[in-house]
Amino acid sequence: MHYLETDRAISRRSDPRRILPGCKSIVVLGIHYEPADRPALPSENPTGRLASYAWGDDYHIVLKPRLQALIKFIEEQVGHPVANRWYTDTGPVLERDLAQRAGLGWIGKNTCLINPKAGSYFLLAEVLLDLELEFDAPFVTDHCGTCTACINACPTDCILPDRTLDANRCISYLTIENKGAITPDLRPLLEDWVFGCDICQVVCPWNLRFAVDAGDPAFSSHLQLAFPDLITELTLTPEVFNEQFRDHPVKRAKRRGYLRNVAVALGNSGSKKGVPVLIKALSDHEPLIRAHAAWALGKIGGENALQALKEALEKEIEREVVYEILQAIGHQVS
């Protein structure tokens, strides 16, 4: 993620006073969301999976008034205005490092912050203050030990042994932050994930033993979206997408990114039920969706899929989509 490598980004992350001149303290907060152990409901159609933090409202929207209320409370306690800045995954701060220094937990091998009494299903936020506060002791011990459950479970091998993560292979990055095509070698490894991924948290022993039973209710307000019907989702128009995911994290991927992911998940399902909507997606106005629908049709196979790919090839003008169609046809006839 090259936007993190600019001189301005590095300097602001290295010194909070470049963000808030006079910054003396940082309050770091965590809020629980739903553990990713809810089973999918039986369905006649193939379904996808959303990371469990996305089973409710967008945390940026949820936490904004709460952080503002905290600042108001602090100012009431000290009796005067306090210069401040607040962030929740929105600003140039190293959230996990600050959380570790604030005593909230340690950074695990999966690069998530883990609390020994609550696991890792929580979101972080920070308030920078021009106010001296009594500091908490940092969390200095590491409790991952010799465990490699997260490393072993990751389908794309994105978790590296040196406690770094290759974002270019991470399912969360590929399905959310990545705005282009998902490389063909990684598509089968996404399985049924259409937005984010929880695998490295699901297998973590600290979550298996100590994760909270339920998160904040705001993060479970859209449970009907947790395991979306892939056939229905691939038919979403821009208008329906915007309405369905208003104030929801999925909106970050935008329609073209989300339907790209849905097409890949449909291909991975192998279900012939997905062929009609994938054929329709070959005419979508977004080339990114058309390209991944072609791949999915090639993966599922069948005469209907092959005929539709040949017809699409005759009228397709985008080079990247033409390539995907040719590859899909080749996969079928080989």
Image: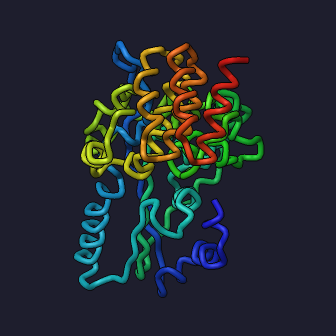
| Residue at the front extreme of this rendering | 314
Q: Nearer the viewer, residue 127 or 44?
A: 44
Q: Is residue 171 visible?
A: yes
Q: Residue at x 43, y 64 (%)?
A: 126
Quarter of the image that includes the N terminus: bottom right
Percent across and percent down for residue 230 are: 40, 27
As drawn, 75 above or below 249: below
Residue 45 occupies which quadrant of the picture? top left
As drawn, 303 above or below 116: above
Q: Nearer the viewer, residue 315 or 84?
A: 315
Q: Is residue 42 left or right of residue 90?
A: left
Q: Residue at x 62, y 40 (%)?
A: 322
Q: Is residue 117 visible?
A: no
As drawn, 179 above or below 321: below
Q: Is residue 259 left or right of residue 232?
A: right
Q: Residue at x 42, y 82 (%)?
A: 130
As drawn, 14 above or below 49: below
